[in-house]
Image (cartoon, rainbow, N blue to C red):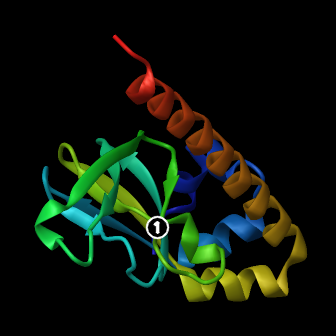
Amino acid sequence: MVSKELLRRFPFFGFLTPAQIREVALISDEISLEAGEVLFSIGDKADALYVLLSGSIDLHYIVIDEHLPQLKKDFLVGTINPGEPLAISAVIPPYELTATAVATESCTLLKIDGVELLALCEADPALAYGLQAQIARATMERLHMTRVLLAAATTPV
């Protein structure tokens, strides 16, 4: 459990009512990562939603050729900054992570239990709507940044 005040500090949770903040705080924990540590990998089950409290995390999309596994390609697709969510797949079926998250420096994160968060959403449609609006906003920002990275990678020098 984390303090309600911690949640109130971040715009991602700005839509929550005081009662909703209390409920989300009860299913949340604070965790730490060291630089270079992997938080999750592509294909893992998405069992928690995270919000970065401090530090920086890079998201990688890793492609492995099944015929030539030594030809693994690793694409940086974004950087998560404090206040931003990650592992948003925890609230989107099929609840499977689509990137690998690596801490670029020491980090502190808020970890929200995915199953319990979905149960809260089921019981409270306003919470579900607000959460999905925040997730959609984060998804659109990531899509925009991925397009910028793709354009930079394909533009001749």
When the figure is inspected, residue 45 is found, relative to residue 77, above or below; the finding is below
Q: Residue at x 32, y 47 (%)?
A: 75
Quick check: 77 left or right of 63? right
The quadrant of the image that shows the C terminus is: top left
Q: Amino acid at mark 1?
A: Thr
Per the image, the residue denoted by label 1 is: 98
From the viewer's side, name the closer residue of 42 and 10: 42
The quadrant of the image that shows the N terminus is: bottom left
Quick check: 60 left or right of 45? left
Percent x, y of residue 147: 56, 35
Q: Residue at x 31, y 60 (%)?
A: 62
Extreme-right residue of the structure: 125
Instruction: Look at the image and tell me whether residue 127 can be seen.
Output: yes
Percent x, y of residue 6: 50, 53
Q: Residue at x 56, y 43 (%)?
A: 142
Instruction: Look at the image and tell me whether residue 17 can be seen.
Output: no
Percent x, y of residue 15: 78, 52
The quadrant holding residue 45 is bottom left
Percent x, y of residue 28: 48, 73
Q: Residue at x 30, y 66 (%)?
A: 31
The 10 Å Cα crowd at callout 1, few under 14, some 14 to 19, many 20 or more, is: many
Extreme-front residue of the structure: 67
Quick check: 105 left or right of 58? left
